[in-house]
Amino acid sequence: MPKARAGLVRWAGQAAVITGAALGVSASATADVRTSTQTQSYSVGGTSARTLVGYMRSNPFRGANGDAVASTRPSYALHIASKQHGGTCRPSEVTLNINFVVTVPRARSALEGSTQTAWNGFLAFARRHEDTHRRIYVECGNAFVAKAERLSSSTCAGLDAAIRRLLESEKRLCDGRQRAFDRAEYGRVKGLALFKMAGGSSRASR
């Protein structure tokens, strides 16, 4: 959560796991967003709320944009097919493949009682948070392909370049949406039982 590629709270370490299922979202007959998700885990040491939180702060997971406790990283592959008709080239197919690498925490040791309950609540929050990041990326991808299929140029080379510039612009806009989401979530992280039990403060970012 927080940070331009999606990450949970900066000070801490991230860890593993969302589901590894592939999702497909069609924008239209000629424009597609296709996604896949890889999962990994960040092993967190400790048996109490204080030691778990302390471990994440001292041994953070290095995300794409700094330290975090959970993270979603997208990578993009764009396929464009186009047709020239007279003096105009238009796209016949725009396919955006997004591969997500999602990281959320995993407790290394068995936990007991209220610590286990608090950890479960934290982990559920992290998974929901990263799933929302992933959903936002897919929404951004669908917006991109809808815009891309409406573009035209006098040459197909010019069209290809215009679509690729559009993708970079839309990615920057999407990063802004992700940062806004993280800012809105920051207060909720501080209020989670795990952090209240651990005491101290956390700084957010992803």
Image (tube, rainbow, N blue to C red):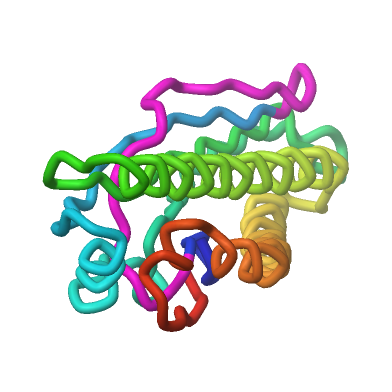
Q: Nearer the viewer, residue 66 or 199?
A: 199
Using the rendered view, name the quadrant where residue 65 is placed.
Answer: bottom left
Query: Residue 4: x percent and y percent?
Result: 55, 69
Q: Nearer the viewer, residue 192 or 113?
A: 113
Q: Nearer the viewer, residue 130 or 54?
A: 54
Q: Could you tell me which residue is drawn at 62 percent across and 69 percent down?
A: 186
Using the rendered view, name the quadrant where residue 71 is placed.
Answer: bottom left
Residue farthest along the top direction in this orientation: 29
Query: Residue 171: x percent and y percent?
Result: 63, 61
Using the rendered view, name the quadrant where residue 70 is placed.
Answer: bottom left
Q: Could you tell me which residue is drawn at 22 percent across and 52 percent down?
A: 42
Q: Is residue 21 above or below residue 177?
A: above
**Residue 156 counted in the magenta span:** no
Q: Is residue 101 above or below residue 27?
A: below
Q: Could you tell me which residue is drawn at 72 percent across and 28 percent down?
A: 31
Q: Which residues are magenta?
A: 9-31
15 relative position to 177: left or right: left
Residue 160 seen in render? yes
Query: Residue 176: x percent and y percent?
Result: 70, 70
**Residue 16 counted in the magenta span:** yes
Query: Magenta: predominant secondary structure element?
Result: loop
108 relative position to 21: left or right: left
Q: Nearer the viewer, residue 70 or 99?
A: 70
Q: Could you tell me which residue is drawn at 60 percent across and 32 percent down?
A: 95
160 relative position to 71: left or right: right
135 relative position to 124: left or right: right
Query: Residue 140: x percent and y percent?
Result: 71, 48
Q: Is residue 35 above or below residue 54?
A: above
Residue 103 seen in render? no
